Image (cartoon, grey):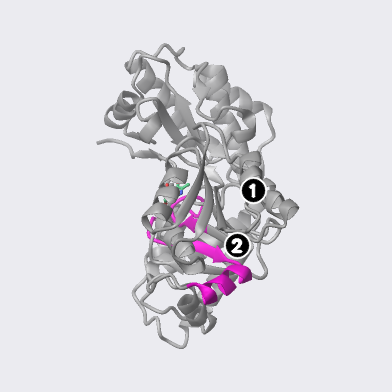
């Protein structure tokens, strides 16, 4: 097959060559005297990405899902009440995990395409006068629908009510792409993974745990072993891990953190927003299609879920894009299967790369009979990107 595969699923994202090269290392002794310097550099860099002074970043050899399980089993007791909202496949899966692990899940159902229901959380927490709810779960960026939620607003609800529940945030498809503030938003556990904004292969669960959550872990009787925060924090304190870490992934993570800092985190977020705006222009102004996200307040800067017109099957567009144009688009999951395809616009990306995804999706839609005007998506994105100032971080530099 000529040419390369265009990877535009919302994770794994494209791994930059710099990171691939950084990962091409011989194995080394993870108990050597030299090793703690690597661990310490990584943990310090992660603190800056999570925007925390006091919380502990933790790297597990898992994916993001492992960090969900760690959050639930480290800080809660069997049968504890959890308050969560469900508005897409990933918020659903976290709720489902809570149920399967034996917690008492209070779930606020929200229409897919909307985000975390601030007033829903307020009324549920206000009614909980005995403070039986021990943790509040929120998905910052619902990857299935391309919806971003306001975490600070949920924190504010807890503050307004003086409710002591821990705040757990799934930032798997936001961290490193969309602003996240551990300390300012007083998040107790942030859950993320390596394969999205951090531009690495999948295989690392990356999480951050507040001092309040670590205190809760001291008091938790929930069984856990491999994912024990306290074992990890104790070992990390000396620069080591409680078990064998993945050396290439650690070197890759170190390089990813350097790259994010070189660009500047705020510039990284501005770039994601600017690129996402171009994609949204293609979808709404060019193709005259709708996003699954129901209103601009929910629009995600890391992924767009695009609704195909009634009578068409988005799965066919995805298959056509893959087979004919070597372009991987994200599938519609669960309730929106067949109804949406997704363009992931996160990680190491620029306008011209995204043009490939827009043009390829456009051709695949046309091949499937969807009446979009040829060139309309590319034209709308061009119009947007050529009339708005690009954030630093785009272009080859001087
Ligand atoms: C928002 C969100 N949460 C959780 C997950 C699960 O993460 P992982 O696949 O790394 O286990 C994903 C994966 O795409 C996600 O997008």
User: Magenta stretch?
Assistant: 191-220
Quarter of the image where the N terminus is located: top left
The quadrant holding residue 6 is top left
Estimate the x, y position of residue 236 in percent, counting from the top left. Answer: 50, 78
Look at the image and say whether residue 217 sits in the magenta stretch.
Answer: yes
Q: Which residue is mark 2?
A: 188
In this view, the residue farthest toward the right is 160
Give me the residue at 59% from left, 74% from top: 215
Q: Please tell me whether mark 2 sits on a helix, a strand or a loop.
A: loop
The quadrant holding residue 386 is top right
Estimate the x, y position of residue 312 in percent, counting from the top left. Answer: 35, 17
Could you tell whether 16 is left or right of 213 in the image? left
Q: Which residue is mark 1?
A: 127
Give me the residue at 28% from left, 35% from top: 2
Label 1 neighbour load within 10 Å: few <14, some 14-19, many 20+? few
Could you tell whether 383 is left or right of 366 in the image? right
Give me the residue at 44% from left, 50% from top: 94
Estimate the x, y position of residue 34 in percent, counting from the top left. Answer: 47, 84
């Amino acid at each position: 097959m000529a040419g390369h595969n265009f990877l535009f699923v919302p994770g794994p994202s494209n791994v930059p060559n710099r990171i691939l090269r950084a990962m091409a290392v011989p194995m080394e002794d993870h108990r050597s005297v030299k090793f703690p310097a690597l661990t310490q550099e990584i943990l310090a860099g992660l603190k800056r990405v999570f925007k925390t002074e006091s919380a502990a970043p933790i790297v597990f050899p898992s994916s993001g899902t492992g960090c969900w399980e760690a959050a639930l089993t480290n800080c809660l007791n069997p049968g504890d009440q959890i308050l969560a909202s469900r508005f897409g496949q990933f918020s659903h899966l976290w709720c489902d995990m809570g149920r399967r692990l034996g917690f008492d899940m209070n779930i606020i159902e929200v229409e897919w395409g909307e985000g975390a229901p601030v007033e829903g959380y307020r009324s549920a927490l206000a009614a909980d006068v005995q403070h039986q709810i021990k943790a509040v779960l929120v998905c910052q960026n619902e990857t299935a629908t391309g919806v971003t939620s306001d975490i600070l607003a949920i924190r504010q609800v807890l503050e307004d009510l003086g409710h002591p529940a821990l705040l757990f945030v799934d930032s798997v498809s936001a961290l490193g792409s969309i602003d996240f503030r551990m300390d300012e938003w007083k998040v107790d556990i942030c859950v993320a993974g390596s394969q999205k904004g951090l531009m690495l292969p999948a295989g690392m669960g990356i999480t951050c745990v507040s001092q309040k959550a670590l205190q809760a872990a001291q008091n938790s009787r929930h069984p856990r072993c491999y994912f024990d925060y306290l074992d990890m924090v104790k070992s990390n304190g000396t620069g080591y891990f409680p078990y064998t870490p993945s050396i290439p992934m650690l070197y890759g993570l170190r390089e990813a953190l350097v790259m994010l800092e070189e660009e500047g985190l705020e510039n990284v977020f501005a770039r994601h927003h600017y690129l996402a705006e171009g994609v949204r222009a293609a979808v709404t102004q060019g193709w005259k299609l709708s996003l699954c996200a129901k209103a601009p307040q929910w629009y995600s800067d890391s992924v767009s879920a695009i609704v195909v017109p009634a009578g068409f099957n988005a799965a066919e567009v995805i298959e056509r894009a893959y087979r004919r144009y070597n372009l991987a688009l994200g599938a519609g999951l669960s309730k929106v299967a067949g109804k949406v395809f997704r363009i992931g616009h996160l990680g190491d990306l620029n306008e011209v790369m995204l043009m490939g995804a827009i043009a390829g999706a456009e051709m695949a839609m046309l091949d499937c009979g969807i009446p979009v005007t040829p060139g309309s998506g590319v034209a709308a994105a061009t119009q947007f990107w050529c009339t708005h100032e690009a954030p630093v971080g785009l272009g080859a530099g001087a």
